[in-house]
Amino acid sequence: KKAISSIEEVIKNFDNHSIDMMYALPDQSKQNWLTQLSLATNFGLKHISLYQLMIEENTVFYKKGIKGLDEEKANELYLLTEDYLNAKGYQRYEVSNYSQPNFQSVHNKAYWLGKDYIGIGKSAHGRLKIDNKHYALTDRINMEKLTNEERAEELIIMNLRLTEGISKQNFYQICGINFDDFVNKDFAKEAVNKGLLINNRDTIKATLQGFMLLDYLILGLCS
């Protein structure tokens, strides 16, 4: 009730709004998840971020024996979400983010596209390219130099999350390495044959099935 009340207040006072939702909860049914998605879309929220519950070792939930849905059922909810939100006019532009047209998260896309950014505040971090050299900023006075190869791996990790995938030209402009020369070509070809990746001259991107195996694809390409 408090969550719904808060959403109502936001809608009254702002034209642009987003909500974070978690799925694959213990024993969660398809109908339960559809009910929650229906609530969110009926409010007319412009942006929806969806996160699968993952219980990590040594956490309180793990020690209590709490478990999320198994992988197969969680994947079913992911696919159900895709169909439902598409029908409601939301476009998936990143593995876990959907928006109405023209309401994609500008600052998050900056991270995923590999643009420069500065973190401000405790535990914040950033990435900067200065004089054609890459730096990781872990606090206001510490700048750790990154190799072109390290930056290339980061770009694959972040860019492949996007529905539009990796622009090979943008990849080269940022890290100075040809994408097709950097990645594991045999793995990329195998992933394409399995229907997990779409690879052409200009871009490489994950399919819907590929998004459910994104960690596997990233590790394979960088191996």
Image: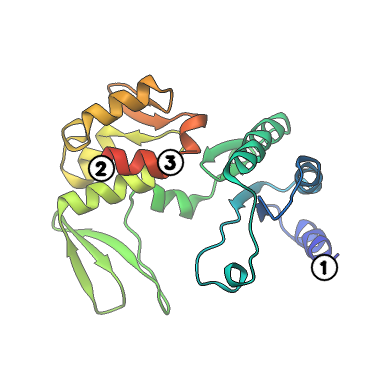
Of marks 3 and 2, which one's residue comes earlier in the chain? Answer: 3
Of marks 2 and 1, which one's residue comes earlier in the chain? Answer: 1
Residue type beneath disc 3: Leu
C-alpha separation, residue under disc 3 versus residue under disc 2: 12 Å
Crowd tier of the residue under label 2, counting other residues whose Cα lies within 10 Å: few below 14, some 14–19, many 20 or above: some
**Whether residue 117 is situated above or below residue 41 in the rendered picture:** below
Residue 59 at what x, y percent from top left? 54, 72
Residue 113 visible in the shown view? no
Residue type beneath disc 2: Cys
Q: Which residue is mark 2?
A: 222
C-alpha separation, residue under disc 2 versus residue under disc 1: 44 Å
Q: Which residue is mark 3?
A: 214
Label pair 3/1, CB-CB below 8 angstroms: no
Is 157 displayed left or right of 223 in the figure?
A: right
Residue type beneath disc 1: Lys
Give me the residue at 53% from left, 50% from top: 105
Label pair 2/1, CB-CB below 8 angstroms: no
For the residues carrying marks 2 and 1, which lies nearer the camera in this image?
A: 2
Q: Which residue is mark 1?
A: 2
**Whether residue 164 is situated above or below residue 45 in the rendered picture:** above
Give me the residue at 26% from left, 60% from top: 128
Residue 210 at what x, y percent from top left? 46, 33
Q: Nearer the viewer, residue 54 or 118?
A: 54
